[in-house]
Amino acid sequence: MQVKKTRTMWSWAFYDWANSAYATTVMAGFFPVFFKQYWAADMSVNESTFWLGISNAGAGLLVALLAPVLGAIADQGGLKKRMLLSFATMGMLMTAALFLVQGGYWLLALMIYVFGAIGFSGSNVFYDALIVDVSERDQLDRVSALGYALGYCGGGLLFALNVLMTLHPDWFLLADKAEAVRWSFVSVALWWGLFTLPLMLFVHEPREAAAAYWWQASRDGFTQLRGTFHQLRSLKPVWLFLLAYFFYIDGVNTVARMAVDYGLSLGFDSTVLMTALLMTQFIAFPAALALGWLGERWSAKGVILVCLAVYAVVCVWSTSMQQATDFYWLAAAIGLVMGGVQALSRSMYARLIPRHQSAEFFGFFNMLGKFAAVMGPALMGVASIASGSVRFSILVIVLLFAVGAVLLLCVDEQTQEAQSEATSKTGAI
């Protein structure tokens, strides 16, 4: 039994290894560079930053609107795993399709990118919700951190190979850097598909026979969703946490999605930026595990607050970057905290909510995360256009970290954890 539980936990965590290749190679790495230098080479720096920010915001908005509804349906039908695989498949196909987009077709590239981002983000709604089915309550911090740690390692390994392909395309029988980047998109789709197989084969969720039909699950899901809106009003620590998360995860997501674009706008060479991104991935691997361990022994909330403080300092520091070594130091600082704040936010929230409504509540969790991703990149893009200074645009992120930290301090996690455990037992009867 213990071997089966361990296999299930690792199989779940390996989905992070699988889909983080998209987050690293596509979202944070090659797509911003390729968009500026290949698909939108005729645009100004500020204009391309604007369109990239708006595209990230649009994808986040659509997933945000759908997440709670899909989560409620998944809870009723035992469909979390099926929905995860459906969204993941769409993400894989769209990522591979980027290979076909020729230079100058920036609008087509953005459209395919948006659908790929929807697949990536949508699958994460159900991946997060499955954590309550693969982990005991007292292991949530460690299991959540394991997922993020494997994600940084797996995403970093493929990204390292992709960077090598662009630096030495002749080693891989490729014509030039452009062809190497296009084949990198294909490699991400294949990697994502291959390492999703353990989850598909070994992760199972409880299902009721009566909830096997999509139409019935949809009907019951909408009924449950209306009830949960009313239920949330009585769960002050939950909605207060969600409000805090809305602000601070906006900053985290914006830094991840716009860092390479920011560095390019400051004039840094793309090789420097890719190297810094690789550093971040491999530093984040052990750091996420360490912070997960620390969250179990100290306090998830306390560790998150320390991570937010580091993020704020990094944003202020980044306005004065002049040399490549500055970017490397910043990458190292972000690598130390980004896995911790994400993993511990997920595990802290999992303890606050009723277990039998995990997909729906994680729908709200991801909804606010995606609405935050709408605000952050859009604000940064608008600030860049309005001020004429890319350096000024990064400062808007500091306010988001500050507001999120203040709200998080007000969350009474001990009382809510006891209440959610009692509610989960009642709901399971």
Image (tube, helix red, strand yellow):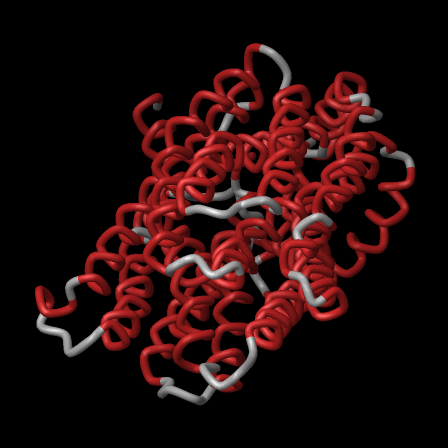
Is residue 236 shown left or right of residue 126?
right
Q: Nearer the viewer, residue 274 or 263?
A: 263
Out of 49 and 240, give the one closest to the viewer. Answer: 49
Q: Residue at x 77, y 43 (%)?
A: 399
Which residue is the extreme one toward the top?
Answer: 297
Q: Position of residue 264 (x, y in %)?
A: 48, 62
Q: On screen, 337 above or below 299?
A: below
Which of the 4 image quadrants contains residue 411? top right
Residue 112: x and y, percent? 48, 78
> Quadrant where the N terminus lies?
top left
In the image, taking residue 419 as reference, residue 98 lies left or right, namely: left
Residue 73 shows up from this direction: no
Q: Quadrant of residue 282?
A: top left
Which residue shows up at 65% across the image and 40% down it? 316
Give the image location of residue 169, x and y in percent: 16, 68
Q: Residue at x 38, y 77 (%)?
A: 98
The residue positioned 61% from the left and 53% from the top of the image is 254
Question: Residue 10: x percent and y percent?
Answer: 35, 35
